[in-house]
Amino acid sequence: MLLKRQRTAKTSLIDYKTLETTMDTMSLEGRPYIELHSLLKLEGWCETGGVAKQAIAAAMVSVDGRVELRKGCKIRAGSIVSFNGREVRVVE
């Protein structure tokens, strides 16, 4: 017996006001920036900095909707970082 999976496309409008309030945030706590690999580690998305660097090199991380390959990319307030289905907005 073969099982078939059906995928249904759901379309919905995005309420950007709600999106901003439900998205996780990370504070820079007075620093001007944080390096991308450090952010992944501090958020608990990667166990070590080495794992974070591998994820970045494998094009698994995006910043502001664009794939980022620079491990030391400076993430500043206002940026949105995405990894493995999670997102965080960086605030001052």
Image (tube, rainbow, N blue to C red):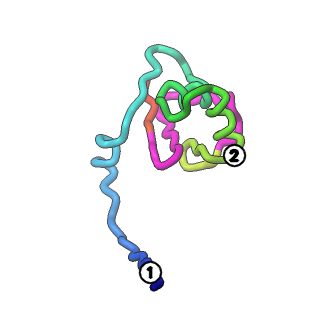
Seen in the picture, residue 45 relative to 9 is either above or below; the reply is above
Amino acid at circle 2: Ala
Task: Give the residues drawn in magenta, as a range.
Answer: 68-87
Tell me residue 79's x, y (percent).
51, 36
34 displayed left or right of 53:
left
Seen in the picture, residue 3 relative to 85 is either above or below; the reply is below
Q: Which residue sits furthest bottom? A: 1
Amino acid at circle 1: Leu
Q: Nearer the viewer, residue 56 or 72?
A: 56
User: Which residue is pictured at 42% across the width and 28% down the height?
Assistant: 26
Around disc 2, counting alpha carbons within 10 Å, would you say few (fewer than 14), some (14 to 19), or many (20 or more)?
Answer: few
Q: Which type of secondary structure does the marked residue at label 1 adopt?
A: loop
Q: Earlier in the sequence, mark 1 or mark 2?
A: 1
Q: Which residue is mark 1?
A: 3
Q: Quadrant of residue 57?
A: top right
Tell me residue 51's x, y (percent).
64, 33
User: Which residue is pictured at 33% across the width and 64% down the height?
Assistant: 13
Q: Which type of secondary structure does the marked residue at label 2 adopt?
A: loop
Most prominent secondary structure in the magenta stretch? loop
92 displayed left or right of 66:
left
Q: Does the magenta-highlighted stretch encompass residue 76?
A: yes
Q: Quadrant of residue 71?
A: top right
